[in-house]
Every structure is written in C-alpha cells, then in structure tokens.
Image: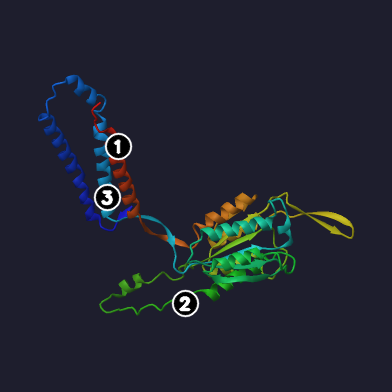
Amino acid sequence: MSFARPLLLLTILVVPAVAALYLLVERRRARYAVRYTNLDLLASVSRGRSWRRYVPPTIFLLALALVSIALARPHVRTLVAGDTATVILVIDDSGSMEADDVKPTRLAAAQDAVRAFLDRVPSNVRVGLIVFAGEPQVAAPPTVDHQLVRSAVGAIGEFPGFGGTAIGDALAAAVQLAQQSAPPVPPKPPVVTTGQTIAFRAAAQPAAGAAKRSPVSILFLSDGSQTRGFLQPLDGAARAKAAGIPVFTIALGTPQGTLTRSFGGFTRTIPVPPDPATLRAIATTTGGTFSAARSASAVKAAYANLGSRIGRKPGLRGVTSSFLALAAALVAGAVALSMLWSPRLP
C-alpha cells in the first residue's frame, strides 16, 4: 500500500491523545463522583458493566485511526483497465465443436464462456472476434461495443465455412486484424541533447532488439489439431511473437470426445480429441498462458479469469472511500453499543 499524502499519516497521533484525554476524564469523574446513599442501588446499576464502558470508545478510536489513514489517500497496487487495450477472440467453429463431451456441446459451452468473458472485460477495451474452421473469418472488428460482439458470438455456427481446422491461418488472421485496428501511436517528442554526455544518451535509449509488448492480446480456443490451412500452428505463433502479441490458448474437450456421422446408411463414430500440446506450445512461444477445459464450467472459469486480467495493466487504485466507509460503520456501531449499554436505573 502507498499513500498520496504520507505526511498526513501523522494525524494518527491524535488517537493516543484522545485516548489519554478520555482516561483522564474518567479518572476525574471517579474522583468527584456523586455519592449515593443507597449503595445497593449503585451496585445493581454498575454490576457487569466495567468492561463494556470501554468498548464504544475503543471502537470510536479505531474509526478515528481509519479516518487518519484515509486522509493520506491510500492506494493499493492492482490491475487497472488499459486505455488502448484490444482483445481478439478466436473461436474454433469446425465440425468437431458439435461433440457433446462438454455439455451441452463444445460450441455452446464456448459461446457461454465468451459471454462470461465479455461480462468481466473492462468496458473501454476493444474486443474483436474471428471464427475459423478451414479458413478464418472476421465476425466482428475490434470495438468497444461489446453487445455487437455478443451478437456475433450468438451467430457462430449459423454460417459454416470450409471444413477442417486451420489453426495457423487463424492466428495469422488475428495478428493481421490486431495490427490493422491498432490505434495510432503519437510521435515522441524530440530528444534534447544539450548538456548531455554520449554515455547518458546511450543509457537513456532502449537496448537494441528489446521486445516490445503490444496492448493487444489474442484469446484462442480450439478443440482439435490442425487439419487444413497454409500456415502451421507454430508459424502463426511466430507471427504473433514477432508482433509482441501474447496468445492465451484454451484446449476444449476430452480425449474421449467423439462425433457420430452417417454415410450411405452406415453410422460411424469419429474420435475428436483436443490437441493440448500444440495449443500449449503456441502460448509458450508468444508469452501467453494455456488452459485445458474438459467441462463447461472449466471453460467458463478460464474465460472469466482471463476477462479479469486481459486488457488490464499494473497500476494503483485508490481505496480512500473504503477506509471512510469502514470508519463510518464503526462510528455507527460505537453509538449503538453506547446507547444499548448505557447505565439505566432499574
């Protein structure tokens, strides 16, 4: 935790001062207490309340300490939404996505998971969608209109393309779409060299060949291995790596997944296991992460988790309001306890 105004933390010294003043007043009150002629009545009023009398003041002092901390404007380091972040969703729409080893089907589970992702991703993050089978198709260009992307997700499977699974081509299409839609980078101000030594100017420049991190991420889901396309999967991953775009991959399905097809009156069962090794290699190559999803809940959790991370960058978030809200609650509690436990004549 850090503070925008750390010197104001000194106001917390008010807490021990108030505590000392309270104890002094209590001692003086005991010294000059009113004398009761009926000692039995006095005992009945004060019995069992010796420790309770200190609870409300203690809670109040704690609330005062929280207010002092709030004055210093505390911040916590966390992930905050990026201003220019873009996420390209790539969804496999090949025939194997009709398998029902992931209920109700792999495709339906993926669609529900993407909707969960759209619920988590920051509203200012641009999201695009590419659907692929034997070839990739842009279903939604990168946009902050997440409802448009949600509609495109619902339409997956209505317009089937060429059969097969072209993983490498889909990755290349995602990289190309990301580069085409990237916001323009403002020009850097000229470097003032007056008074600088050659060593200083050299140290200020980034190292040659240093990798640049793109504000774009690719979220890639597939349930099978490459069966079609011009580029191999790792060739597509190499393009993403060269562009500095991490690819987060999800392998959907179980090794026992099958499809039932009828050919000329004969029924045939076709095994359609996922290819986690290839998808893991893509993620490793590009600096992303890999997830294996063998159930609808697993793929939804994977998307929801990525939705909480992708499109965000490390930053500081103010928590002043949280400290003030807790302090207000403690004051209310102290007042309530004081009224409840105040001595009353029987």
- Residue type pointed to by label 3: Val
Determine which residue is flagged by label 1: 337
* Apparent side of residue 146 relative to residue 69 in the rendered image (left or right): right
Q: Position of residue 168 (x, y in %)?
A: 65, 67
Q: Are marks 2 and 1 in contact (CB under 8 Å)?
A: no
Determine which residue is flagged by label 2: 184
Q: Position of residue 256 (x, y in %)?
A: 73, 49
Closer mark to the observer between disc 3 and disc 1: 1
* Apparent side of residue 181 relative to residue 336 in the rendered image (left or right): right
Residue lying furthest left? 32
Distance, label 2 to label 1, CA atoms, is 60 Å
Closer mark to the observer between disc 3 and disc 2: 3
Label 3 vs 2, first from the N-terminus: 3
Residue lying furthest top? 40
Q: Position of residue 60 (x, y in %)?
A: 26, 42
Q: Looking at the image, can residue 235 be seen?
A: no
* Apparent side of residue 227 relative to residue 248 in the rendered image (left or right): right
Residue lying furthest front? 346
Q: Position of residue 201 (x, y in %)?
A: 33, 74
Label 3 vs 1, first from the N-terminus: 3
Estimate how packed mark 2 is, as few (under 14), some (14 to 19) or many (20 or more) residues with alpha carbons within 10 Å.
few
Which element is circle 1 on?
helix
Determine which residue is flagged by label 3: 67
Q: Looking at the image, can residue 68 be seen?
A: yes
Foreground of the two, 170 or 4:
4
- Residue type pointed to by label 2: Pro
Q: Residue at x 57, y 53 (%)?
A: 302
